[in-house]
Image (cartoon, rainbow, N blue to C red):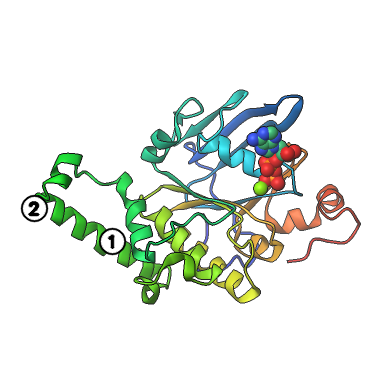
Amino acid sequence: MTEEGSGMNDGDTKCVVTSAAMLELKSVHKRFGGLHAVNDISFRVEPGCIKAVIGPNGAGKTTLFNLIAGNLPVSTGTIHFQGQEIQEKKPYQIAHLGLARTFQNIKLFHGMTALECVMVGRHVQSRAGFFSGMFALPSTWKEERAIRNRSMELLELMQIADCANLEATSLAFGQQRAVEMARALAAEPKLLLLDEPAAGLNIYETAEVARLICRIRDMGITVLLVEHDMSLVMDISDEIVVLSFGKKLAEDSPTNIQKNAEVIKIYLGEDDAITA
Ligand SMILES: Nc1ncnc2c1ncn2[C@@H]1O[C@H](COP(=O)(O)OP(=O)(O)O)[C@@H](O)[C@H]1O
Ligand SMILES: [Mg+2]
């Protein structure tokens, strides 16, 4: 990126196109029976960027995330993550390569504290094996302590450290999103996929989530998000991809997307401008 700092975008921050994309989709298709849910989608996500995928309901956004994370097989096309082809890999293999995600519907475990939820997310990185765990070897205690410390750090980064010992599902939605993000970060990803991080949040919580996403980007983690909240998308994204009925309609900076007549027409179904 050409600009530094933890703030929102104040203009057209552009990602520098490097030879090695963090993520690159080439002609990706996904069919469900006769339905072309994802239809010939190609785009790159540059390292260090916040890129958003927008589009009306049913445009194929969640399906696209499921293809990238390996939760659904592609029909045709290729997906490269840090230069490696991943479209044939399983979700856990892709996670190991450094990709983490959150889901459209919050998926926290009942009966677990916020801290425990984040610690679970750390297991991808954990080295302790089953037997050392069973016999509680000193190496396991050490690793457990390290996991706990890092998880606390991440809760602090997401500004919910004071909720660490509260049951995660009893927290306000905004705090639950922050726990989810901390849990995803616990795997120390290079790329984080966020599916509608502001869904169900009020404007204050949404503004907080926007700050947290910028903070994640400032940690050096690339972010790809799907989001309906246009003010969030326009404030924090470096680039936006617009999908409509599975097809890519546009890919541009937030400023240009807001001026794109075709986007305005399909996205709003009327001739009003998309306002941030
Ligand atoms: N597992 C599935 N099986 C069949 N059809 C699906 C499946 N998932 C999504 N679809 C269809 O694919 C299209 C895109 O859905 P989705 O990716 O959820 O859109 P978005 O997230 O943009 O709202 C929709 O028409 C939806 O009904
Ligand atoms: Mg969706």
Q: Would you identify the image quadrant in which residue 64 lies?
A: top right
* Secondary structure of the residue carrying numbered label 2: helix
For the point 44% across and 59% down, which residue is it? 110
* Up-down relation of residue 194 to residue 250 (above or below): below
Crowd rating for badge 2 (residues with CA inside 10 Å; few <14, some 14–19, many 20+) = few
For the point 41% across and 68% down, which residue is it? 167
Q: Is residue 5 visible?
A: no
What residue did someone put label 1 on? 150
Q: Is residue 196 visible?
A: yes
What residue did someone put label 2 on? 138
User: Is residue 244 toward the left or the right of residue 83 in the image?
Assistant: right
User: Is residue 257 toward the left or the right of residue 96 in the image?
Assistant: right
* Up-down relation of residue 172 to residue 38 (above or below): below
User: Is residue 209 toward the left or the right of residue 55 in the image?
Assistant: left
Residue reaching furthest to the left: 138
Q: Amino acid at mark 2?
A: Pro
Q: Position of residue 194 (x, y in %)?
A: 54, 52
Q: Amino acid at mark 1?
A: Arg
For the point 75% across and 53% down, which residue is it? 257
Looking at this view, is 2 or 224 the one in front? 224
Numbered tag placed on residue 27 in the rendering: none
Q: Quadrant of the C terminus?
A: bottom right
